[in-house]
Image (tube, grey):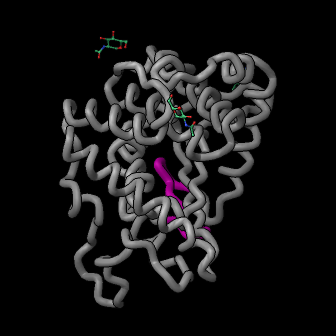
């Protein structure tokens, strides 16, 4: 736990000091994550990989866009069905509402991370505990997902997903500056660093090879942190990342 916290604290420092990086002639790189709330590969990506954007200074050069729709369908009669059933439609809408209510990624990501960590632990029916855990007011999100706004947002994400070129083939579908990463999606750090045109690359990019010779698929995070966080490590990671992201709020025990 201490080591993890230390990493997070150090990263926090580099995050604040590298905020200038994006001003250095480089546009932020857009990372679009097309996903659905109950897909196991999606929750794994969010819980074990994506949060590291915030740990490292990569978030300073990245526009992270979450698009919770995936393989859902809008039928001609107006009903929406989801690949993993009605509960997935509910949580897609809840996550879409969280993004709408807290537009800054630093505000909505902790909530989505929390919900997806419950999905990862097969305990997602307790998703409402995430409000309390993060000290967030539940009412704006609740009003949204129970009302018309929630449906509006899902229809907007449906349109955005259906407009993908090339179309998505599966979820999670990660797109960096318009280019799908296909099954190499866990390597998003490599693609972000490669796409970033600023003169000063963030420190998280150093050590990534940008040459033509890239025979072995590398995964920055696998290299740095090992393949997968175990169940108990996950518990600690959730605590650490949430308290880091929400560091001035009281985080109730998970
Ligand atoms: C709407 O269409 C879907 C798919 O065709 C169907 O399963 C569903 O029962 C319909 N719902 C209503 C209310 O007609
Ligand atoms: C699911 O979450 C609830 C509420 O946090 C907790 O009481 C319960 O023990 C959890 N169950 C599992 C299987 O983790
Ligand atoms: C952070 O929390 C402390 C103690 O609750 C408070 O004194 C301080 O003003 C807060 N800082 C910000 C930036 O909200």
Quadrant holding the N terminus: top left
- Residue at image coords 55%, 63%: 62
- Residue at image coords 58%, 72%: 22
Res. 229 image quadrant: top left
Instruction: Looking at the picture, tell me which residue is in the foreground, 113 or 241.
Output: 241
Whether residue 169 is in magenta: the answer is: yes
- Note whether 32 is above or below 132 in the view shown: below
Whether residue 182 is in magenta: the answer is: no
Expressed as whole percent of the image width and height from the top left, the position of residue 83 reads 52, 32
Ligand 1 quadrant assignment? top right
- Residue at image coords 59%, 46%: 105
Residue farthest toward the bottom in the current orientation of the protein: 212
- Note whether 214 is above or below 64 in the view shown: below
Number of marks in the image? 0
Expressed as whole percent of the image width and height from the top left, the position of residue 254 reads 35, 21
Res. 142 image quadrant: top right
Instruction: Looking at the picture, tell me which residue is in the foreground, 14 or 101.
Output: 14
Expressed as whole percent of the image width and height from the top left, the position of residue 125 reads 45, 15
Q: Is residue 135 visible?
A: yes
Res. 178 image quadrant: bottom right
Q: Is residue 85 visible?
A: no
Span highlighted in magenta in the image? 168-180
- Residue at image coords 68%, 28%: 80
Expressed as whole percent of the image width and height from the top left, the position of residue 192 reads 48, 70
């Amino acid at each position: 736990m201490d080591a993890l916290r230390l990493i997070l604290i150090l990263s926090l420092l580099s995050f604040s000091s590298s905020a200038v990086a994006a001003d250095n002639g480089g546009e932020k790189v857009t990372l679009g994550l097309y996903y659905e709330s109950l897909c196991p590969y999606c929750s794994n990506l969010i819980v074990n990989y994506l949060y590291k954007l915030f740990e490292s200074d990569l978030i300073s050069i990245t526009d992270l866009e979450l698009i919770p729709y995936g393989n859902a369908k809008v039928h001609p009669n107006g009903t929406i069905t989801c690949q993993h059933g009605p509960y997935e439609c509910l949580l897609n809408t809840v996550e879409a509402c969280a993004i709408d209510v807290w537009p800054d990624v630093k505000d909505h990501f902790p909530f989505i991370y929390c919900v997806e960590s419950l999905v990862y632990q097969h305990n997602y029916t307790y998703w409402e505990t995430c409000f309390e855990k993060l000290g967030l007011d539940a009412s704006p999100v609740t009003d949204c997902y129970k009302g018309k706004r929630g449906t509006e947002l899902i229809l907007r994400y449906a349109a955005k997903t259906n407009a993908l070129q090339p179309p998505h083939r599966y979820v999670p579908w990660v797109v960096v500056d318009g280019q799908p990463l296909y099954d190499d999606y866990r390597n998003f750090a490599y693609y972000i660093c490669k796409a970033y045109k600023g003169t000063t690359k963030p420190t998280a990019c150093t050590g990534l090879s940008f040459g033509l010779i890239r025979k072995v698929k590398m995964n920055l995070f696998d290299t740095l942190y090992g393949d997968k966080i175990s169940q108990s490590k996950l518990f600690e990671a959730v605590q650490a990342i949430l308290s880091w992201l929400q560091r001035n709020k009281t985080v109730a025990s998970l």
